[in-house]
Amino acid sequence: MLGAFSNKCQHYAVVPEGLKNSVRAVLLSKLGGVLMTQFLSDFEELVKEPLNFKRLGFETLEAFLRAIPDTARYVDASVLKRHKAVDFKILRKVYCKQ
């Protein structure tokens, strides 16, 4: 019984705070949220490097984003928005790296 349960659960690596800050910056860059289909390209455009969520142990972008509910939230199946609590100093740091 326990084996069946553990097969349905995924182990997720801890997402570094710096990466969460970059995700927040991307989500803040679009007023109405970011389309899932655009998220990776928006991330790469803003952060100047690709988001390699598979290297962190996530099979999909959706799994990665669902693992950081303190950072990103789904508005519906295709739109992401930032979590309400945002430190704008973090956003400034990400933008200033460019």
Image: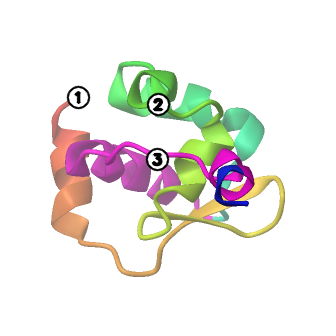
Residues at marks 3 and 2, CA–CA distance in whole angstroms: 21 Å
> x, y percentage for residue 70?
42, 70
Tell me which residue sits at (24%, 72%) in the image.
87
34 relative to 24 in the view: left or right: right
Mark 2 residue element: loop
Mark 3 or 2 closer to N-term?
3
The label number, if any, that marks residue 98 in the structure image: 1
| Above/below status of 78 relative to 45 | below
Q: Which mark's residue is nearer the viewer, 3 or 2? A: 2
Q: Which mark's residue is nearer the viewer, 1 or 2? A: 2
Residue 73 picture quarter = bottom right
The label number, if any, that marks residue 8 in the structure image: none
Residue 75 picture quarter = bottom right
Tell me which residue sits at (62%, 52%) in the image.
6
Mark 3 or 1 closer to N-term?
3
Mark 1 or 2 closer to N-term?
2
Which quadrant does the C terminus fall into?
top left
> x, y percentage for residue 31?
59, 63
Residue 89 picture quarter = bottom left
Residue denoted by label 2: 57
> x, y percentage for residue 82?
50, 66
Tell me which residue sits at (17%, 33%) in the image.
97
State the residue in front, 6 or 31.
6
Magenta stretch, residue numbers: 4-31
Mark 2 residue type: Gly
Which quadrant does the N terminus fall into?
bottom right
Mark 1 residue type: Gln
Q: Which mark's residue is nearer the viewer, 3 or 1? A: 3
- Let me know if residue 9 is in the magenta part: yes
> x, y percentage for residue 65?
56, 51
